[in-house]
Every structure is written in structure tokens, then in C-alpha cells.
Amino acid sequence: MTSHPQPSPFQAGTSQPGSSQAGHGRSVPAGEGPSEPATSARHASGKAIQKRAQARRDALLDAAVALLEDGGFPAVTHRAVAHQAGVPLAATTYYFDSRDQLVAHAFTRLVECELAATGAILSGPGSLVDRLTALVGQDRARQLGLWELYVHAGRDPVLQAIARTWTDGCDAALATALRRDRYPHSPADVRFLATLLSGLWIETTVEARPGTAAHDTLTRALNTLRATKT
């Protein structure tokens, strides 16, 4: 086979990078030629596609979280999430390679929501004991999903890292609240209160215990912390 030389892209009659030819031999600066509207349209189209993709991914995660809250860990499957989100099954498998990956992202979303709610409650008005009691009495469905995945994380290193993020975030919010209300807030003080709070959280969530019992226990804990300051 005989090969024929290919014409150079920079032969006479073609423009060099950075400029274009317009009538009468006048050079037009790069970016001001006729290709600019097309480039802008492609850019806008690309951003719109990314926005739609992110919206679909968020809808899938919201669906996974809702299933976790309603039916727990076993309820989260690609098919169930796709049905809940109202999208084709292929969309779920496109964004999340495996069920484990889907659950991990849903757990992350749950933790983010929980930390935001925790921060809002602890930084709100009222006495510290009332704010801590309000934490224990948060949305039971969300708490069930969180604690179920928290326990399951003991067998899954990926979920374990997310669980630690939840614990560390709660500790940071508690430390800020204790400091604000002038309670001792050393790492040991925070861990003492956080551990007690976790126990009450689990009891209230699993056993549906009344908030008054948590209020009395938390009052005693805060009095104990206050006593260590004097």
C-alpha cells in the first residue's frame, strides 16, 4: 500500500493557534472568532448535564435514606432505591457500582443530616440539659437507620470510617456547647457526656423510653461535671 503524505494543519490558507483569518488579511484575536458562541453553548450544555446528573444522584441517595429509615439495612437494594426515586434501575447501577457503595453513601448522607441537626439543637436557645434532651428525642426513624448502620459498621471498615466521623462530629458539637455554657469541656469531660448520651440515645430509640428519664439522667451528669470545676 502506498502512503500519501498528510497535509500539515498549519499549511498556507489555515490559521495558526491563537488567531484566525478574516477578510482583507486582517487577523482576528483568538476567542473573538465565530467559534466562541459554539464553545459557550457546549460549556452551558455540559453544566446543565452535570446539574441533572447531580440532581439524579441526590434523588437516589434521598431514596436510599428513606428506605433505611423505613425498613433498615435489608431494605436498601438497587431495585428498591430506583423504584423509590422513580428512575430506571440502570440509573442506580450507573451511579453506584455495588449495594455496599450505595449503603456507604447513604450512611454518609444520614450522618451529615444528623450532625447538622445536632449542631442546630446544641447551638439553639434554652438550658443545656433541655438541648441535650432534645437530641435524644430526635426523629426516631432516622435514629433507627443511623444506629443500625453504626452497629453494622463493626463488620465493615468503610462504614466504620463513616461511623467515626459521626462520633467525632458529635464530640466537637458537645465540646462547643459545654464551653458556651461554661461547663468543663476537656476531652475526658466530652467523652463522659457523649458516652452517656449515646446510651440514652440507643435506649430511647430502640425501647421508645420517655424523654423525662433522659432529662433527669443528663441533669445529674451536668451537675457532676459542674462539681469537678469547683
Image (spheres, helix red, strand yellow):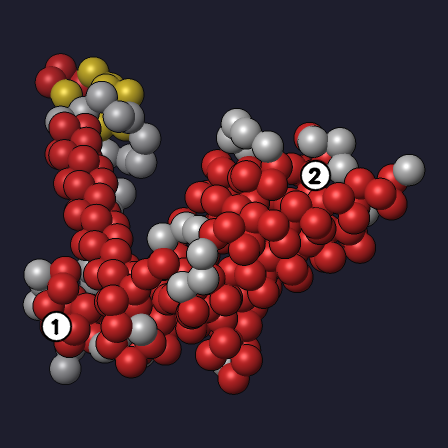
- Residue 176 shows in this picture: yes
Q: For the point 55% across and 72% down, which residue is it? A: 160
Q: Give the Cα distance between marks 1 and 2.
A: 47 Å
Instruction: Give above or below for 140 relative to 19.
Output: below
- Give above or below for 166 relative to 121: below
Q: Amino acid at mark 1?
A: Leu
Residue receiving disc 2? 178
Mark earlier in primary sequence (1, 2): 1
**Residue 63 vertical placement versus 157 (above, below):** above
- Residue 94 shows in the view: no
Category of crowding for the residue at label 2, using alpha-carbon neighbours closer than 10 angstroms: few (below 14), some (14–19), many (at least 20):
many
Amino acid type shown at disc 2 = Leu
Q: Left or right: where does residue 155 sit relative to residue 226?
A: left
> Can you tell which quarter of the image residue 208 is in?
bottom left
Q: Describe the element under mark 1 as helix, strand or loop.
A: helix
Q: Which residue is mark 1?
A: 89
